[in-house]
Structure formats: structure tokens, C-alpha cells
Amino acid sequence: MARKQKLDFSNVADTRKKQDLNQHAFWIRYGVTQSGGSRYESGRNIPKPLAILLWLHLSGKVSDKDLADALK
């Protein structure tokens, strides 16, 4: 049986800062406002669909272009 891996984004602000992006530039790629992203960075639970999208993107399975195309 496959081992379940929990998606942990408790350090999403650090991830964003390592990319040298402000909150707006980081979160808009996922269809999230700056204020929404700020709430997630402050500890509010990230909805599972958004967490999955973050994981796919940050693991390289979804590209920046894929994200931009999906938001069109």
C-alpha cells in the first residue's frame, strides 16, 4: 500500500521569499489575491485543491506557463 504523504505548506512564506517574489506575484499565479495569500502565510488552512496545485507546481509537475494558460 502506498504511504500517504501530507501536504505541508507551513513554510509557504519561506518558499515565496526564496523565489524573491512579493505576495502578489507569488499568489496570483494560483488565482489567489495578495490578501488571501497573506492569510495562508499567516496560518490559515490552505484548501486542498490549492494545496495540490501548489505541490504540483513547486515539484515541477506543472510549469509557470501551465499556470498562466489555466488562468486565461
Image: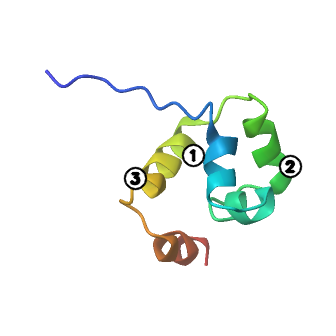
- Name which residue type carries label 1: Leu
Tell me how far mark 3 sits from mark 1, CA to CA: 14 Å
Mark 3 or 2, nearer chain start: 2
Instruction: Give the residue pinned by disc 1.
Output: 50
Q: Secondary structure at mark 2?
A: helix
Q: Position of residue 6 (x, y in %)?
A: 42, 26
The answer to whether residue 5 is above or below residue 72 is: above
Q: Residues within 10 Å of mark 2 (few under 14, many from 20)?
A: few
Q: Secondary structure at mark 3?
A: loop
User: Residue 35 bears which disc, if any?
Assistant: 2
Residue depicted at 61% across the width and 78% down the height: 72
Residue depicted at 73% across the width and 37% down the height: 40
Say whether residue 32 is left or right of residue 15: right
Q: Position of residue 36 (x, y in %)?
A: 80, 46
Q: Residues within 10 Å of mark 3 (few under 14, many from 20)?
A: few
Tell me how far mark 3 sits from mark 2, CA to CA: 24 Å
Q: How is the image coloured?
A: rainbow
- Name which residue type carries label 2: Ser
Mark 3 or 1, nearer chain start: 1
- Name which residue type carries label 3: Ser
Instruction: Give the residue pinned by disc 3.
Output: 59
Q: Nearer the viewer, mark 3 or mark 1?
A: 3
The answer to whether residue 5 is above or below residue 39 is: above
Q: Position of residue 35 (x, y in %)?
A: 86, 49
